Image (tube, rainbow, N blue to C red):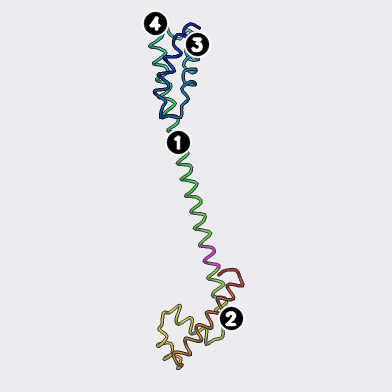
Amino acid sequence: MDVVNYFENPLLRFSHYNCRYSAIDPEDAVQETFIRLHRTLKKGECQITNAKTWLFTTLRNFLIDESRKIKHRKAYRENQINADLDTTTKEADVLEGMIKEEAEQKAIYHLNQLEDLEKQIIQLKAIQNFKLREIAEMMDLSIGRVSYLMNKGLKTIANKLNDDGIV
Protein backbone atom coordinates (compact mmCIF):
# COMPACT_ATOMS: atom_id res chain seq x y z
CA MET A 1 0.00 0.00 0.00
CA ASP A 2 2.92 2.35 0.51
CA VAL A 3 3.60 2.20 -3.22
CA VAL A 4 0.04 3.32 -3.97
CA ASN A 5 0.18 6.23 -1.50
CA TYR A 6 3.62 7.29 -2.69
CA PHE A 7 3.00 7.15 -6.47
CA GLU A 8 -0.73 7.85 -6.75
CA ASN A 9 -0.52 11.66 -6.98
CA PRO A 10 2.42 11.79 -9.44
CA LEU A 11 0.73 9.17 -11.63
CA LEU A 12 -2.57 11.09 -11.50
CA ARG A 13 -0.82 14.31 -12.57
CA PHE A 14 0.89 12.47 -15.41
CA SER A 15 -2.39 10.83 -16.42
CA HIS A 16 -4.38 14.10 -16.24
CA TYR A 17 -1.79 15.85 -18.39
CA ASN A 18 -1.79 13.10 -21.01
CA CYS A 19 -5.59 12.64 -21.01
CA ARG A 20 -6.58 16.29 -21.32
CA TYR A 21 -7.72 15.90 -24.97
CA SER A 22 -8.93 12.33 -24.63
CA ALA A 23 -12.01 10.44 -23.51
CA ILE A 24 -9.89 8.34 -21.16
CA ASP A 25 -10.58 8.82 -17.46
CA PRO A 26 -7.21 9.60 -15.78
CA GLU A 27 -8.24 8.00 -12.48
CA ASP A 28 -9.26 4.78 -14.21
CA ALA A 29 -5.93 4.72 -16.02
CA VAL A 30 -4.00 5.04 -12.73
CA GLN A 31 -6.19 2.38 -11.12
CA GLU A 32 -5.53 0.03 -14.06
CA THR A 33 -1.80 0.67 -13.65
CA PHE A 34 -1.91 -0.39 -9.99
CA ILE A 35 -4.01 -3.45 -10.89
CA ARG A 36 -1.36 -4.46 -13.43
CA LEU A 37 1.35 -3.95 -10.80
CA HIS A 38 -0.56 -6.19 -8.40
CA ARG A 39 -1.02 -8.91 -11.05
CA THR A 40 2.63 -8.76 -12.06
CA LEU A 41 3.84 -9.07 -8.47
CA LYS A 42 1.33 -11.83 -7.70
CA LYS A 43 2.35 -13.92 -10.72
CA GLY A 44 6.01 -13.18 -10.31
CA GLU A 45 6.29 -12.63 -14.08
CA CYS A 46 9.18 -10.23 -13.90
CA GLN A 47 11.48 -8.62 -11.38
CA ILE A 48 10.61 -4.93 -10.94
CA THR A 49 13.85 -3.17 -10.14
CA ASN A 50 12.62 0.42 -10.40
CA ALA A 51 8.95 0.84 -9.36
CA LYS A 52 8.72 4.45 -10.55
CA THR A 53 9.94 3.64 -14.04
CA TRP A 54 7.76 0.54 -14.27
CA LEU A 55 4.61 2.39 -13.11
CA PHE A 56 5.06 5.39 -15.41
CA THR A 57 5.95 3.18 -18.39
CA THR A 58 2.93 0.94 -17.76
CA LEU A 59 0.65 3.97 -17.39
CA ARG A 60 2.04 5.55 -20.55
CA ASN A 61 1.58 2.31 -22.52
CA PHE A 62 -1.96 1.91 -21.16
CA LEU A 63 -2.86 5.46 -22.25
CA ILE A 64 -1.44 4.84 -25.73
CA ASP A 65 -3.33 1.54 -26.05
CA GLU A 66 -6.61 3.11 -24.91
CA SER A 67 -6.19 6.03 -27.31
CA ARG A 68 -5.70 3.60 -30.17
CA LYS A 69 -8.76 1.58 -29.13
CA ILE A 70 -10.86 4.75 -29.02
CA LYS A 71 -9.64 5.78 -32.48
CA HIS A 72 -10.40 2.34 -33.89
CA ARG A 73 -13.86 2.29 -32.30
CA LYS A 74 -14.58 5.77 -33.64
CA ALA A 75 -13.40 4.81 -37.14
CA TYR A 76 -15.47 1.62 -36.97
CA ARG A 77 -18.58 3.55 -35.88
CA GLU A 78 -18.06 6.09 -38.69
CA ASN A 79 -17.71 3.26 -41.22
CA GLN A 80 -20.87 1.66 -39.86
CA ILE A 81 -22.75 4.96 -40.10
CA ASN A 82 -21.50 5.49 -43.67
CA ALA A 83 -22.47 1.94 -44.61
CA ASP A 84 -25.92 2.45 -43.08
CA LEU A 85 -26.31 5.72 -44.97
CA ASP A 86 -25.26 4.06 -48.22
CA THR A 87 -27.77 1.27 -47.66
CA THR A 88 -30.52 3.75 -46.80
CA THR A 89 -29.68 5.86 -49.86
CA LYS A 90 -29.77 2.81 -52.12
CA GLU A 91 -33.08 1.69 -50.65
CA ALA A 92 -34.50 5.20 -51.09
CA ASP A 93 -33.30 5.26 -54.70
CA VAL A 94 -34.95 1.90 -55.41
CA LEU A 95 -38.17 3.05 -53.74
CA GLU A 96 -38.11 6.33 -55.67
CA GLY A 97 -37.62 4.40 -58.91
CA MET A 98 -40.56 2.14 -58.09
CA ILE A 99 -42.76 5.13 -57.31
CA LYS A 100 -41.79 6.84 -60.57
CA GLU A 101 -42.47 3.66 -62.51
CA GLU A 102 -45.88 3.28 -60.89
CA ALA A 103 -46.70 6.94 -61.61
CA GLU A 104 -45.66 6.50 -65.25
CA GLN A 105 -47.82 3.40 -65.60
CA LYS A 106 -50.84 5.17 -64.14
CA ALA A 107 -50.23 8.23 -66.33
CA ILE A 108 -50.09 6.02 -69.43
CA TYR A 109 -53.24 4.22 -68.29
CA HIS A 110 -55.08 7.52 -67.87
CA LEU A 111 -53.68 8.78 -71.19
CA ASN A 112 -55.16 5.74 -72.91
CA GLN A 113 -58.56 6.54 -71.34
CA LEU A 114 -58.72 9.95 -73.09
CA GLU A 115 -60.56 10.64 -76.32
CA ASP A 116 -58.54 9.68 -79.39
CA LEU A 117 -57.86 13.24 -80.52
CA GLU A 118 -56.59 14.37 -77.08
CA LYS A 119 -54.51 11.21 -76.73
CA GLN A 120 -52.90 11.67 -80.17
CA ILE A 121 -52.07 15.33 -79.53
CA ILE A 122 -50.47 14.58 -76.14
CA GLN A 123 -48.49 11.68 -77.61
CA LEU A 124 -47.22 13.85 -80.46
CA LYS A 125 -46.30 16.73 -78.15
CA ALA A 126 -45.02 14.97 -75.02
CA ILE A 127 -43.56 11.78 -76.42
CA GLN A 128 -42.45 12.71 -79.94
CA ASN A 129 -41.66 16.38 -79.19
CA PHE A 130 -43.57 17.91 -82.08
CA LYS A 131 -44.39 21.61 -81.92
CA LEU A 132 -48.03 22.70 -81.67
CA ARG A 133 -47.82 24.23 -85.16
CA GLU A 134 -46.60 20.92 -86.62
CA ILE A 135 -49.34 18.98 -84.82
CA ALA A 136 -51.96 21.46 -86.06
CA GLU A 137 -50.76 21.00 -89.65
CA MET A 138 -50.73 17.18 -89.36
CA MET A 139 -54.23 17.01 -87.89
CA ASP A 140 -55.68 19.85 -89.97
CA LEU A 141 -56.69 21.80 -86.82
CA SER A 142 -55.96 25.32 -85.62
CA ILE A 143 -53.10 25.85 -83.16
CA GLY A 144 -55.62 27.14 -80.63
CA ARG A 145 -57.73 23.98 -80.92
CA VAL A 146 -54.62 21.76 -80.57
CA SER A 147 -53.52 23.74 -77.51
CA TYR A 148 -57.01 23.50 -75.97
CA LEU A 149 -57.30 19.74 -76.52
CA MET A 150 -53.80 19.12 -75.18
CA ASN A 151 -54.43 21.19 -72.04
CA LYS A 152 -57.83 19.58 -71.51
CA GLY A 153 -56.28 16.09 -71.77
CA LEU A 154 -53.37 16.96 -69.49
CA LYS A 155 -55.75 18.45 -66.93
CA THR A 156 -57.88 15.28 -67.03
CA ILE A 157 -54.79 13.11 -66.51
CA ALA A 158 -53.57 15.36 -63.66
CA ASN A 159 -56.96 15.17 -61.93
CA LYS A 160 -57.05 11.38 -62.21
CA LEU A 161 -53.47 11.11 -60.92
CA ASN A 162 -54.44 13.39 -58.05
CA ASP A 163 -57.40 11.13 -57.28
CA ASP A 164 -54.97 8.18 -57.28
CA GLY A 165 -52.74 10.02 -54.82
CA ILE A 166 -49.83 10.33 -57.27
CA VAL A 167 -49.76 14.09 -57.83
In the rendered image, the quadrant that contains the C terminus is bottom right
Distance CA(mark 4)–CA(mark 3): 15 Å
Distance CA(mark 1)–CA(mark 4): 38 Å
Of tags 2 and 1, the one toward the viewer is 1
Q: Amino acid at mark 3?
A: His
Q: Which residue is mark 2?
A: 113
Q: Amino acid at mark 2?
A: Gln
Looking at the image, residue 44 lies above or below residue 97: above
Q: Which residue is mark 3?
A: 38
Observer-nearest of 103 and 143? 143
Distance CA(mark 4)–CA(mark 2): 95 Å
Looking at the image, residue 50 lies above or below residue 162: above
Sequence-wise, which precedes: disc 1 or disc 4? Answer: 4
Looking at the image, residue 47 lies above or below residue 135: above
Count of marks placed on residues: 4
Sequence-wise, which precedes: disc 1 or disc 3? Answer: 3
Q: Which residue is mark 1?
A: 74
